[in-house]
Amino acid sequence: MTTQQTKNELNKEFKNMKCILTSSMRTKLLLSTYEGPQNLEDLRKKLKKPSATILHGLKELENINLIRKIQKNYELTSNGYLLTTNMIKLIENWYSINKCEEFWNNHDLNDIPERILKEIYLLKNSKYIHSTTSNLSNAFNTYINYISNSTNLKIILPIYSENHFKHIIQILDNNNLTRLELMVNEEIINSIDKNEIFKEKILNNNKVEIICIKKKLKIFLTYSEEFMSLTLFFKDGHYDDSQILIAEDANAIKWSSNLYKHILEENND
Amino acid sequence: MNFDNDINNNIQFLAKSEIRLKILSELYTQPNTVRGIVDLTKITYSSVSSNISKLEKNNYLKKIKNNYHVTSIAEVYFKTLMDFKNSANLIDEYSAFWNKHNLKQLSLDSMRTITDLKDSELIETTPLDIYKTHNIIKDQLIESTNMKAIFPYLHPDYPGIIETILGNDGYVEIIIPKLISKELISNIDPVLKKNSIKENKLKIYSVQKDLELYLTICENNMSLGLFKNDGSFDQNRILISDNPHSKNWAETLFEHVKKQVI
């Protein structure tokens, strides 16, 4: 048996969370009332459960002060609203992870700060593109397509890749890209510096701002006002060019901008 | 809302067992063996061993040599679940503060990042100290050189506090209802006021729209007060914090309200 003290401590720590998440009925009642006050009939139709089951769940939520009854309607209390907002965040976080399960599971996530990982729900509309045996460059080509249509890019680039640089130079030369912020570590800057063309077209380009970071990050993040993309490293330290996460919605761009700012601040500390 | 059965079952698999959560939290900190986890957690060997098998079967853990490692995906599941746990505990801990109070002016983002208020302190007045909340805020403000505030009501001490901060070459930015802004402004020393506005050190936004919360942010701390559901301001409770996360949280909320009311 686990010692009683350990058990008590664990019970106390997880009590509030368990109380909500371990009952599908309570979870669903909170989600339904989050949309607005509901009467028993509304809830019965929505949840397709008998009145007795629903009333029992409502009573439990009333007892812990998450729901209150005003005349015939049930509505969330302030505590209930706050908690349900956070429960929805949790569900959407898990939805986002599940949607691109392979992507998140295959890679090293250590360099994504905890704060940013906890906001993965912002990526719920992202899509996961991977190369296949019949199309080995699928992920790369998709990436190039996206950056080619951008005017203002911010990139955290953790790799030295001539292929990437050639395309970046091309869009800079075409005047498509009017501003590029490139966050790279010193080692990569030195490698760029050794290549005359890259040096001239990237390091000495007034459209490009180079931000030198101390850490060798394992995140390849790109975002503009129109899209964001993320590629990562395998856990064995190798860069994975075959899988990319792409999104075009404002939330995903916000996630990227939060990540970018976070890393910038961390670097300046 | 994407709440399907898979997600529900996955969440429940972890949420139902404190032991599984404890094992994940230990392994997340450091990969370990069954014996190592038993020693760390004081949970019985049989319980650790059977729960580790279940976690491994569900792809939350991977065995490399003798050590169990948390998979990347389990790491994210775990962190987001702990984030929810922390928010539930925080809501419960300051229940008296949120309960029966108006949260309408909190943004959705503020609510989602409520765990940033962790380590705050709930200050409540007592029959022996009925001005406790006001005095604590006053002490915070008077010592600072930088203040942003949403004042839904005017306290006679405020003009003096503002003068002190400005007198120390500080910066003050206030959002205040139009109805009381005249009185506040007329009680600040006219020369100091004129110079501070000119030098961009004093910004007063007097707004028509209702202000439904009380907020102060100084360089080292913040305080938050709420209105009760009956429409009156709750002078008996404030949440204060000197944690930088809470301060950032308050700054974001300040900007949100500013956008909303100006």
Image (cartoon, rainbow, N blue to C red):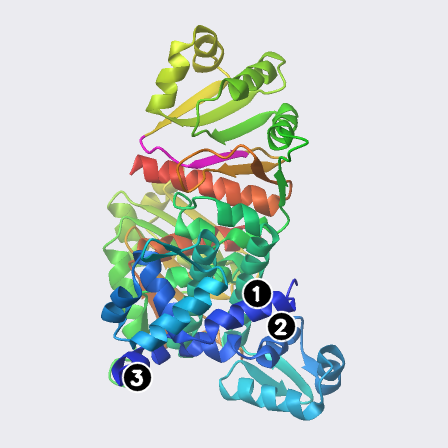
Where does the image place residue A178, in percent across and percent down from the top left? Answer: 57, 20
Identity of the residue drawn at 61% across and 66% down: B6
State the SS at label 1. Answer: helix
Distance of mark 1 from mark 3, alpha carbons? 35 Å
Earlier in the chain: of badge 2 and badge 3, it is 3
The label shown at residue A88 is 1
Q: Which residues are magenta?
A: A214-222
Residue on which disc 2 sits:
A31
Instruction: Report the chain holding disc 2.
Output: A
The residue pinned by badge 3 equals A1
Q: Tell me which residue sits at (58%, 49%) in the image.
A: A123
**From what the image shows, is residue B233 above or below residue A144?**
below
Q: Earlier in the sequence, mark 1 or mark 2?
A: 2
Q: Amino acid at mark 2?
A: Leu
Mark 1 → mark 2, Cα distance in angstroms: 8 Å
Tell me what residue is drawn at x 49 percent, y 30 percent: A155
- Between tags 1 and 3, which lies in front? 3
User: Could you tell me which residue is drawn at 58 percent across and 80 percent down?
Assistant: A26
